[in-house]
Image: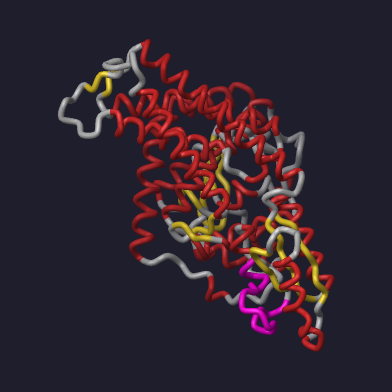
Amino acid sequence: MNRLLGHHVRPELAVLGLIELSLSFLFIHAMLNAPGLSGLFVVASPTMAGGYTVLAALLALTVAVTGATIGLYRPSVFLDRKRLLINATVTGCLAFPAVLLVCNGLSFKIGAHEAAWFAKILGVWLVGVLAIRIAIGAALQHGGFARRILIVGPKDRAEVLAGLLRARAGRWFEPVVIDHPTAANLASLPAIWGTLLLGTQPAVTAVAATMRARAFPIGKLLDEASFHERYLGRIDLDAPVASRFFTPADWSGRTAKRLLDIAVSALLLFLTLPLMLVTALVIRLESPGSALYRQQRVGLAGKTFTLLKFRSMAADAEVGGKPCWAQKHDPRITRVGRFIRMTRIDELPQLLNVLRGDMSMIGPRPERPHFVEQLAQAIPFYDERARVKPGITGWAQVNYPYGASVEDAREKLAYDLYYVKNCSLFLDLMILAATVRVILFREGAR
């Protein structure tokens, strides 16, 4: 597993992205320079270097980033053709105005005829993307591209990890469980390894051990905690992970993150102000009470702050003031409230929390003190998530659905701690992009 700017990235998906980016550039460049198109795309600034090459490169990058944002490179999309078709269609719909904005920013004059040509380019690109992914999906269904994972250790622990791999990674991984609970029977492990490598089955490209890696006579073994982090994007809460692993970012990293928070939250507040005013009005018209809902949440270092949201429930939703989890089809939610929850509009006032410094755009979801106290007693390392500011969106929010139980909170914590350990500006930008997909497809909304 390779690291890109501090974040673990699957090499097969990175290679696929680079191949498609290169093919997009070559195809767009050829289209722009095709016979009969000379002068069709006029460069307004004659001093601009590169001409069509610059345009083709930026358009290819714009389309690729749009596809990644919508989730075309998520492993699960390759196996679901309906979802693939929807994601590809949404990508085309969003990429079209995006490339027009890029052209305008580069002073390329685009009229109706030029826009029609770009629509054709995107259409052909989408057909190519669909063909590639359908082919990869078919190969995965028949065992192709699967990475064989040799899991060594006590059978009960090994089976748990194998089940997690099948649930989280589908057909991308093929777990092979080897029961070696003690050091006495480790002598045969190199022979098993060699058989798998030299046999007719796909080669072993990664290994996870449910015991300490250095206890085995093979240098390439990963301990279970490292495997979770590198291949599943989460922290293994059952492993003896020391709190020293979860270290805050340095001063420069915190400064860059704060500047990103201010810029993004200010821009979004400006763009969504009309929507927020309309939302406040319809909330007041539907039910009595304030349009804004104020609630105490736990933030950085365990300090509480007042979180702002649009009210989505009846004013007397919590009788006696006793906190409780939100459930599916919760009767306390109003009609307007259900809509703004599904579209995440209820979260928009939290942009003010970000500007004030209570929250960040990216981070663990802020929880209520009652639930934090409850979960900290039930889940190991739960307090470690308070090492960074809570966020409007986060690594757990884009990788796991809405949580409404202690078990859900445990699963989300595994992703939150991955973010705490690996937080970077690049990962923040990835999460912001993935949030667009989560909102568009209403993933995890409740």
Q: x%, y% of residue 8?
A: 53, 59
Q: x%, y% of residue 185?
A: 81, 85
What's the residue at 53%, 69% (across, down)? 246
Give the side of residue 297 with respect to residue 238, left or right. left
Name the residue furthest top: 112
What's the residue at 59%, 62% (across, down)? 230
Name the residue furthest bottom: 184
Viewer can see residue 4: yes
Q: Is residue 319 magenta?
A: no
- State which region is magenta: 211-227
Of the pair 185 and 228, the residue shown nearer to us: 185
Q: Quadrant of residue 89?
A: top right
Q: x%, y% of residue 327?
A: 75, 42
Q: Look at the picture and state if 244 lies above or below 82.
A: below
Of the pair 264 and 80, the residue shown nearer to us: 80
Q: Look at the picture and state if 187 lies above or below 152.
A: below
Q: Look at the picture and state if 268 lies above or below 147.
A: above
